[in-house]
Amino acid sequence: MNGNVTYYFGHALTGQGVKHLYKEMMEEAELVYFLQGASTFKGSELLKELGYFYVKQGFAVEWFKHALLEEVVEAVYVKGCNRLYVWASEWDIEPTMLGTKHRVLSFYDCLEDVQLEKIGEQLADAVQERTSWHDKCIAKLNQAIKLHDDWEIATQSCMNWQALNDQVENLKSEVFQSIVLNKTGERTHRLLGTLTPRGAENTVESITKNISTRLMIKGKPGTGKSSLMKGLADEANARGLDAQIVWCGLDAGSVDMVIIPELNFCIFDSTEPHVYDPQDGRLGDKIFDIGQHCTLTEEAEMAVGTVRARYKEAMQDAMGYSKRYAEAEYTVRRLLDNCLSAALWREKTAPLFERLTK
């Protein structure tokens, strides 16, 4: 019987820079394969092949997608045997436990020097262009984050915090009841989505496909959604329950979802840019409305209207820069693919396909 695949984004373009969680996932994994080498489409194909290889053996597999290139996979996590395969060179992560749980496989020697010399100048230009569009995209996202902060200030001034606290305490009682487990609650980390050249995207449907209870938070920016979810994760861990923190793809410090696997429960921000509502036929889907505690004054409404327009403009500009960034990334990968030795590649990758039993 085949396993299944859950999709996440491997990194996000945020207002604070590029965010990834591979260091946290390295702690989670029992065995980490650091695949080192220049970024190529061939590397993504290898990771997909590894994913399918484990799925066919019955393992559940997590695929981590590239923010810019829709079909590119940059890491694979195999649950059950807890193996992480990550194209490490791009993310400034290095093995620290060689000889135990960290293994390194370098693909730099698969590049043919003669071919590299032929495309050297063209490659250098593409890399420089990629860096330029990356920097412009991140700068515009940083501007958007600052505008979003102004938006939050306006809404926070109109929030009934005591009413929210009471609602959250009632939620904790309903979710956890008297559950306390005799173990230490574990915490893991993933990303919900990111800005892409196609707009803001997420993998909510894939992440939550097997979760029976889904609470969808409705509320204005700055009204406590992220803090609420962090508090639920803390409560779960304090009771010995595991919790997965799923981080925002725009603000690197904000949480967009919390999953408590042992309760088959999740709660997530269901406002722009990832609006969700209960689905017909899913009895566990519910709205958790905190918007009821925020009534904007006329002055606040005017402030929000002005900031919202500027925020959307900044995000549109960032998306435009991300398209150019993606085009340059595509060019870099295409050029490098043409320099790979197929024979050396096959020789290098063959040992990775080691059959396991669950």
Image (cartoon, rainbow, N blue to C red):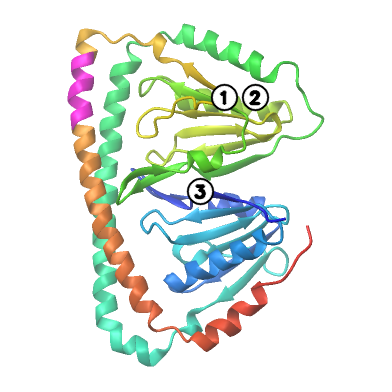
Considering only vertical position in the picture, is 198 above or below 45? above
Considering only vertical position in the picture, is 12 above or below 173? below
Identify residue for label 1. Answer: 231
Residue type (three-letter) at the residue carrying disc 2: Glu
**Mark 2 crowdedness (10 Å alpha carbons): few <14, some 14-19, many ≥20:** some
Foreground: disc 3 or disc 1: 3
Q: Where in the figure is residue 155, as x and y percent of width and height? A: 32, 17
**Mark 3 crowdedness (10 Å alpha carbons): few <14, some 14-19, many ≥20:** many
The span picked out in magenta is 301-309
Quarter residue 161 falls in: top left
Quarter residue 337 falls in: bottom left
Q: Residue at x 51, y 33 (%)?
A: 257
Residue type (three-letter) at the residue carrying disc 3: Tyr
Q: Residue furthest right?
A: 182
Q: Are marks 2 and 3 in contact (CB under 8 Å)?
A: no
Disc 3 to disc 1, C-alpha distance: 23 Å
Identify residue for label 3. Answer: 8
Foreground: disc 2 or disc 3: 3
Give me the disc on residue 120.
none
Q: N-terminal of the two: label 2 or label 3?
A: 3
Considering only vertical position in the picture, is 258 above or below 27? above
Disc 1 to disc 2, C-alpha distance: 6 Å
Identify residue for label 2. Answer: 235
